[in-house]
């Protein structure tokens, strides 16, 4: 009986209900209640209104950011960005802290640093992700590429690929792998210049990651290297556009299959410069593309055979 009384006095949020216990204070008419308001059906008096919106606060296209508090989660940190950072000399309002409070905060930071990592693997993950953030910042990568590189490093650690390899080499290999997966025109040498490890170790780490994880690496075309090398050589727009046409025409004939894209792009710029009256030397073009002068001469012969 008690259960029946409970259900008789409650209502569905989407269906209007009527009750005889609550009558309109104005006309003693029928009162109905829905999820928004309580009104009289006879005179239309609004007796009660629910002003709190219990619906979601996000918009339809904010599917990945349904968080009501705190900063969004990120793959660039070992704890997904949930750690707490303790200040040093000033409080949240910008006021100077006293000596006693600074000493207390110093002890809190020390204890937090000691308990920050639960295992050696978590410490290695934090070090690797920090190296990826540093490389991505030095090379001015977007956050999406940085997060992909961090996720790639996580996968490599999960598959136990860090055993016998340095964390710095695997971090640089993850950045290079993210570039290859997104089709970015970045050479391995450019990644190594920003890293803190030798090129041979990064190359070996990338081969392991590519083989074990099966990366969907996209082939990089020589035409994608034209803008960066042209900016390094400070050539005109006419030379840049002519070199890009040469590279795209060579790509359409499959002449660039199996060649180093940066070297072929440098050869296109060298040929375009001579056609436009800018007599670039093979040495400066090779240095801008980080290749050797015989590579430039070899690709020049290929362009001559294609009669481009």
Image: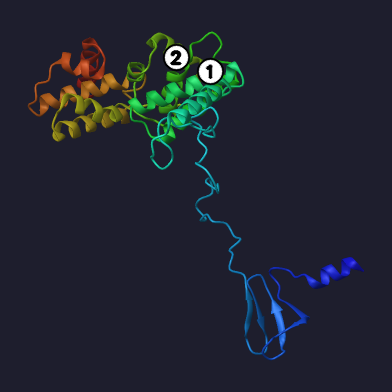
Residue 16 in sight in this render: yes
Snapshot quadrant of residue 43: bottom right
Front residue (pair 167, 218)? 167
Residue 215 in sight in this render: no
Identify whether 12 is placed above or below 70. Answer: below
Taking the image as shown, residue 284 lies to the left or right of residue 56, namely left
Going 64% across and 76% down the picture, which residue do you hit?
48
Q: Position of residue 239 (x, y in %)?
A: 15, 31
Q: How is the image coloured?
A: rainbow
Where is the N terminus found, in terms of image quarters?
Answer: bottom right
Q: How many marks?
A: 2
- Crowd rating for badge 2 (residues with CA inside 10 Å; few <14, some 14–19, many 20+): many
Residue receiving disc 2: 169
Taking the image as shown, residue 189 lies to the left or right of residue 123, namely left
Q: Residue furthest right?
A: 1
Residue receiving disc 1: 124
Snapshot quadrant of residue 226: top left
Where is the C terminus found, in terms of image quarters?
Answer: top left
Identify whether 288 is placed above or below 4. Answer: above
Q: Position of residue 80 (x, y in %)?
A: 54, 33
Front residue (pair 105, 151)? 105
Going 73% across and 69% down the picture, which residue do you hit?
12
Snapshot quadrant of residue 146: top left
């Amino acid at each position: 009986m008690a259960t029946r009384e409970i259900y008789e006095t409650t209502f569905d949020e989407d269906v209007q209900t009527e009750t005889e216990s609550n009558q309109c204070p104005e006309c003693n008419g029928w009162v109905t209640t829905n999820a928004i308001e309580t009104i009289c059906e006879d005179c239309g008096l609004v007796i009660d209104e629910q002003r709190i919106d219990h619906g979601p606060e996000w918009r339809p296209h904010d599917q990945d950011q349904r968080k009501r508090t705190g900063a969004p989660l990120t793959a660039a940190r070992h704890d997904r960005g949930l750690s707490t950072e303790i200040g040093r000399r000033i409080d949240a309002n910008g006021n100077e802290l006293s000596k006693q409070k600074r000493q207390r905060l110093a002890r809190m930071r020390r204890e937090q640093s000691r308990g920050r990592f639960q295992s050696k693997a978590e410490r290695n993950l934090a070090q690797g992700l920090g190296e990826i953030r540093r490389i991505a910042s030095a090379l001015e990568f977007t956050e999406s590429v940085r997060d992909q590189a961090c996720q790639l490093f996580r996968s490599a650690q999960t598959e136990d690929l860090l055993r016998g390899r340095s964390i710095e080499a695997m971090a640089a290999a993850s950045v290079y792998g993210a570039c290859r997966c997104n089709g970015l025109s970045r050479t391995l040498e450019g990644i190594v210049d920003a890293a803190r490890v030798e090129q041979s170790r990064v190359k070996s780490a990338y081969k392991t990651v590519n083989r074990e994880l099966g990366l969907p690496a996209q082939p990089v075309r020589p035409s994608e290297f034209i803008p960066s090398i042209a900016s390094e050589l400070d050539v005109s727009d006419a030379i840049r556009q002519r070199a890009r046409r040469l590279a795209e025409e060579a790509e359409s004939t499959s002449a660039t299959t199996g060649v180093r894209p940066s070297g072929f792009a440098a050869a296109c710029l060298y040929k375009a410069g001579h056609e436009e009256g800018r007599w670039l030397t093979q040495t400066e073009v090779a240095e801008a593309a980080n290749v050797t002068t015989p590579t430039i001469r070899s690709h020049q012969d290929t362009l001559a055979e294609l009669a481009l």
